[in-house]
Amino acid sequence: MLSIEGAKDVVIELNSLSKSHNMAGWRVGVLCGAAERINEVLRFKSNMDSGMFLPLQLAAAKALTLGKEWHEEVNAIYAERREKVFELLDLLQCSYSKNQVGMFVWAKIPSGYNDCFQIADEVLYKANVFITPGGIFGGAGEQYIRISLCGSIEKFQEAIERVKNGLQVDKLKG
């Protein structure tokens, strides 16, 4: 938005470092705009809290200096994890797009399940693997599951083995 002529006078851009810099849960963001607009926010914020823990501020400042190479390395790690998650989803007979990016993979559950909670419970109780039922994010997610890419390759492989053994994959619904 700020690249549009005149926008700097009236627009404030806000972005989070959560996903882009592996700082999920830290509640660290970046606010960009004219000094007057930023100062208005800071005046309001000064009445709301007393500031962020200094080590978090320093970590965020360092994160903002990371170059393209760091981002490429992190993206490669997530791409490798995503492939493992695709293997898991194939075992569960879910459908999904391989074009997804980010820290999560969403998949449509097989038709043999009533909803996402049923498949999530089956995987949890029979294979000891937790997958997030999409329904916890609202009604539109009831036919979907979401898997985080924050685990290691080894953990994803372990989940694959547990699903193979615990669910007797050839007997899955669908």
Image (spheres, grey):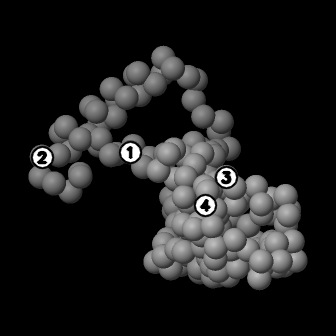
Contact between labelled residues 1 and 3, with CB atoms less than 8 Å apart: no
Mark 4 or 3: the one toward you: 3
Residue bearing mark 4: 145
Q: Which label sits on residue 14?
A: 1
Mark 3 is surrounded, within 10 Å at the Cα level, by few (under 14), some (14 to 19) or many (20 or more) other residues, namely many
The residue positioned 85% from the left and 66% from the top of the image is 127
Question: Which mark sits nearer the N-terminus, 3 or 1?
Answer: 1
The residue positioned 70% from the left and 79% from the top of the image is 91
Mark 4 or 1: the one toward you: 4
Give, as a three-letter code, the residue at label 4. Ile
Q: In this view, does 163 lie above or below 139?
A: below
Residue bearing mark 3: 117
Q: Is residue 114 above or below residue 85?
A: above
Mark 1 is surrounded, within 10 Å at the Cα level, by few (under 14), some (14 to 19) or many (20 or more) other residues, namely few
- Residue 92 quadrant: bottom right
Find the distance from the CA under tag 4 to the CA under tag 1: 29 Å
Contact between labelled residues 1 and 4, with CB atoms less than 8 Å apart: no
Find the distance from the CA under tag 2 to the CA under tag 1: 17 Å
Residue bearing mark 2: 6
Mark 3 or 2: the one toward you: 3
